[in-house]
Amino acid sequence: MSDVLDMDRPTAERAERPAWKEKPKPVTRAGKGVVLVVTVLTVIVPFWVVLATSLSPDSQVIANGGYALWPERWTTHAYDLVFSGGQITRAVGVSALVTVVGTAASLACTILLAYALARPGVTGGKPIMLLILFTLLFPAGMIPSFLVVNGMGLRNTYWALFLPVLVSAFNLVVMRGFFQGIPQELFESAKIDGAGELRILFTIVLPLSKAVVAVVGLFYAVGYWNDFFRAVLYTDQATMWPLQTWMRTYVVQSQQSLINVAGNVNEQIQFAPQTVNMAVVMIATVPILCVYPFIQRYFAKGVLTGAVKS
């Protein structure tokens, strides 16, 4: 009798098991493999073409119609030209400055505001949260933002490149939800020991919130690094443009001024425009690629937990 029950038990377990936990069929596994390979190639092939073109000699790029799949001779002349001084070198510095300062300021403001709104019984917490959610649903338009920045005297300053978007409503909601998921017993124990709110934040909340802080910090950093429109909107001086604005100007308007990095007209002719263009694209892409692998493991825990509990 027990043998019969043992034989029926796996069948009953399989019947109760959800469909997504069933062992996939060979055809399904093969289909997933094909889709995965196609997706990876769709990402890697364009990236490789950009890298190979930036490291290829001028003659090969011109002969192949502006692109190269494998350099006949590896050369870094395009990168040497970009970093030899001038517009692109300054633009890289501007992008790095705005990204570092903007991310640090945004993280500080978001953490403080999210912690205040996550604490129960905060005076005016609900109206403030409703205002923040209102800005998430109905963001400010371009003209009102320009008038505010101009009225505050921030035009043609680096402050205008990150102060108008210092706090993201989405990131604030995610971080607030994460803070609300921390057990209240920890806060009560800390208060019994005489800890203040700032001490609780820095000694208890932040060590437990590394995941959401890392994810939100990456969101801010990528946003600042990839932004090009605020520089066009709030500055009249090309010397204040970040790297992405110069990339957009060159790609859309095909301005040859981007190639004249060293200020030498004869040096322009020795380089194909595509090699310099691809070199700038690689310079703009590599920093995020270097940071992302270290933050990727925090994504599921940081974003999903904060979103579910908010």
Image: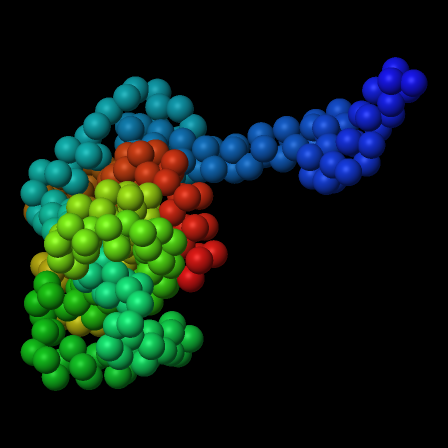
Which image quarter holds the N terminus? top right
Along the line of sight, the residue nearer the viewer: 205 or 105 = 205
Quarter-of-image position of residue 150: bottom left
Say if 261 sits above or below 48 in the image.
below
Q: Residue at x 10, y 63 (%)?
A: 158
Comparing 13 with 185, the one in front is: 185
Q: Is residue 71 above or below residue 258?
A: above
Whether 272 is drawn above or below 140: the answer is above
On the image, the x and y values in percent for residue 237 come to 10, 66
Give whichever of 245, 67 is nearer the camera: 245
Side (left or right) of 230 relative to 101: right
Viewer can see residue 137: yes
| Residue ranking furthest to the top | 3
Q: Report whether 46 appears left or right of 192.
A: right
Q: Residue furthest front?
A: 192
Residue at horizontal 10%, vertical 80%?
152
Residue at image position (11%, 60%) is 240
Q: Tell which of 184 and 268 is nearer to you.
A: 184
